[in-house]
Amino acid sequence: MKYKHALFLNPYIENTATSVMGIFPPTGLEYVATSAKGLVDKLTLIDLRYETDLCDPAKLMDFIRNEKIDIICVGIGWDRQFREICELLNLMPDGIPLVVGGYKATEEVEELFRACPKIHIVVRGEGEETIKEILEGAPLEGILGISYRAGGKIAHNAHRPLPNVNTIASPDRVLRHNVYRMKLNGINMADLTFDSVLSARGCPFTCKFCTFSLNPLGQKRVYSERSVESVVDEIGELGANIILMSDDNFFTNAKRAEAICDLIIKRRIKKRFIAQARIEIAKHPRLLDKMVKAGFKMLLLGIESPHDRILAQLNKGFDSDTIRKYFNVLKKYPIYYHGYFIYGNIGESEEEMAYISKFAKEINLDSITFQKLRIEKFSPLKDIAKKTPGYHVTDRGELYSDTYSHASLKKIGRQIKFSFYTPFQVLKIVRKFLVVRFFTFGEIVSFLAAGPSLLKSVIVREIQKKRLGNSLKRIFVSNA
Ligand code: SF4
């Protein structure tokens, strides 16, 4: 074998005691590490969010030397901590091939080579097949999907065609050194352990703001799904009790989703599932019934905007009346609904942005997150933004205008947040978690006991204002 000991490194450093970013495993990196099995004598996967003793760069470098690691593969999937990760990469020992990949690495190929002289290869797009050829020592000029240093220049090989999802091995959880679990203030929360499963890749829709349906190279991932058996086999082997189905839309093929639910029920698998979905799932009542029986407790839904003009601009594929109609159906099911919104759209007024909170409450969303519009490299919105007077896009894809600067958009974001997350809404969220049995009463109590969490501070505030009794009455007595 060309390499003896490969290190796969998730370089993000989070305080897992307080950050929710740490509860899910680095699935993308795990996929690539798993496909490297059998091609090196030893394979080590390190997640710096958990292996905190190695967050000190000096200790990490000692580890690399002492363990005689002879190739380092780093997954860079996110925008955050980009500069810090580049600094870490620049400390890596000389003479050991340094390979980086992941979503963000693919977007920032040139920048990574510029900022990190020690990087030898950037793997672009999906890396499961590419890593095999690198580890086998294939000549770099023949490996599809990589960019690499060659004679003082950067060579970019042709894109790699996207592989069939059924040929990609699921992440081998044995490679992990830690259990992904929810913590608050450093205390493990009951028995809440997390994992994620990818049952399909790609998305057949073409929302204009979305970078999921295109990889960062602009390649469209045709929707392709794994077999029902393989998905449920994987779920059945997991130790975690909360599973995120991390497909762009787990219910793209309603028949297949139903078959997965049937098999979960048949095998008596007891998990709590979270899934990303489109609101059109409301057209499938039989599927919704089966989902509830199979343990689907939470849906993450892209609503994006309450305004028809903006929904059309984003090519979302539905309008506000359809959203209302579908939520009238969805609210009948014991499922927790989280909605995603985008604000700061082209031509959107402050009043329109602020309406997000009102609309979210009107359609009975339990919680929301909202983000300023970002215009990625291959987004068709780029042209519209360019042609619209007074709008500008930063190098990082952030849209702002002469009327709404970054600072004013941030301020509007805070207004939306505070007008949605009132103390009453927070208590409603607690109630909904109990109603859908996402958390048990004991787990909720342990959250409250864990320290100055949001819930605790809200309840304390309500008690101080002598409003707790009224709030509880409104929640538990009425159907508000
Ligand atoms: S927003 Fe969702 S539905 Fe639209 S293209 Fe992206 S993943 Fe698909």
Image (cartoon, rainbow, N blue to C red):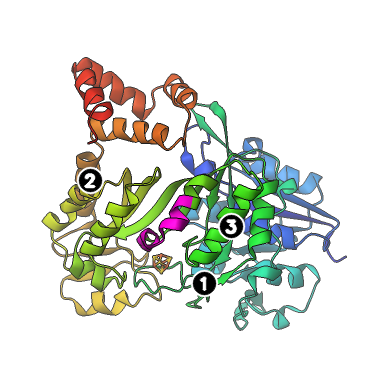
Q: Nearer the viewer, residue 193 or 59?
A: 193
Residue located beneath label 2 in the image: 361
Residue located beneath label 3 in the image: 260
Distance from Cα at disc 2 to Cα at disc 3:
32 Å
Give how far across and how far down residue 136 sits, in percent: 81, 70
Left-right relation of 139 to 270 = right
Residue 405 figure quarter: bottom left
Label 3 crowd bin: few (<14), some (14–19), many (20+), radius 10 Å: many
Say above or below: 416 vs 120: above
Q: Amino acid at mark 2?
A: Lys
| x 25%, y 78%: residue | 384
Query: Main SS type for the magenta part?
Result: helix
Q: Which residues are magenta?
A: 279-289
Res 290 seen here: yes
Q: Amino acid at mark 3?
A: Ile
Look at the numbered disc 3 and give the secondary structure of its residue: helix
Say above or below: 324 vs 15: below
| x 47%, y 32%: residue | 439
Asked whether 36 falls inside the magenta stretch, the response is no
Look at the numbered disc 2 and give the secondary structure of its residue: helix
Precedes in sequence: disc 1 or disc 2: 1
Left-right relation of 11 to 66 = left
